[in-house]
Amino acid sequence: MYVTPEQFQAANKANIDATLTLAASQFAAFEKFANLNATAFKTAFEDAMANARALAGAKDVQEFVSLQSSFAQPAIEKAIAYSKNVYEVTTQTNAEVSKLTEKRVADWNDNFVTLLDKAAKNAPAGSDVAVTAMKQMIAAANSAYDNMTKVAKQATEIAEANVTAATETAKNFAKVKKVA
């Protein structure tokens, strides 16, 4: 059995399409991170300017200390929001990459099984045992990959729950500090 130029061209096109899709996904994530960081830096700069002006206008030490204490809560909330946004972008990008990887693995497996079937038709008598063994190995590898994917998704869900819990704990801790 021979690989035709059309099959070779189709495989190359699929690989290039997958690479470009991955690059676009990574660039989109980079763009989101850049926007997130630019916004965070701008906000931090504006807050620092406003805080410096407020501190410069303090009439006595007690007002100065009170103003400094009041700056902590918004800063903590903004840091928590920033961290949550970074986590969301990372999780979204990871999901896109995983989806692309799963599709490429499925396509590769389908193509390989098709190739095995074609090879089996042209193979000498008695080679069907080897072809069956190869198909069973592919099925076992697919099963292992599916299990690994399920475990990774469960780990992601647990991580998301932990991030949510940690975010709430940090918010509550900041509120307690403010009250105290």
Image (cartoon, rainbow, N blue to C red):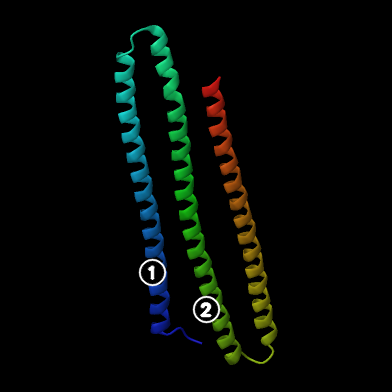
Q: Judge left or right: residue 8 versus residue 136.
A: left
8 w.r.t. 163: above or below = below
Type of residue at label 1? Asp
- The one nearer the camera, 4 or 86, is 86
Whole-percent x, y for residue 153 in the image: 60, 57
Name the residue that disc number 2 marks.
111
Q: Residue lying farthest top?
A: 60
Type of residue at label 2? Asn
Residue at the (41%, 61%) spot, across then down: 22
91 w.r.t. 108: above or below = above
Q: Earlier in the sequence, mark 2 or mark 1?
A: 1
Q: Judge left or right: residue 129 versus residue 33.
A: right
Name the residue that disc number 1 marks.
17
- The one nearer the camera, 168 or 62, is 62
Which-is-in-front pick, marks 2 and 1? 1
Query: Mark 1: which secondary structure?
Result: helix
Residue at the (57%, 91%) spot, across then down: 122
64 w.r.t. 160: above or below = above
46 w.r.t. 59: above or below = below
The picture quadrant where one finds residue 35 is top left
Whole-percent x, y for residue 117 in the image: 59, 86
Residue at the (43%, 82%) spot, across then down: 7
Labels 2 and 1 touching (C-beta < 8 A): no
Whole-percent x, y for residue 118 in the image: 56, 87
Whole-percent x, y for residue 46 in the image: 30, 30
Instruction: State the count of labels.
Output: 2
Q: Which quadrant: the C terminus?
A: top right
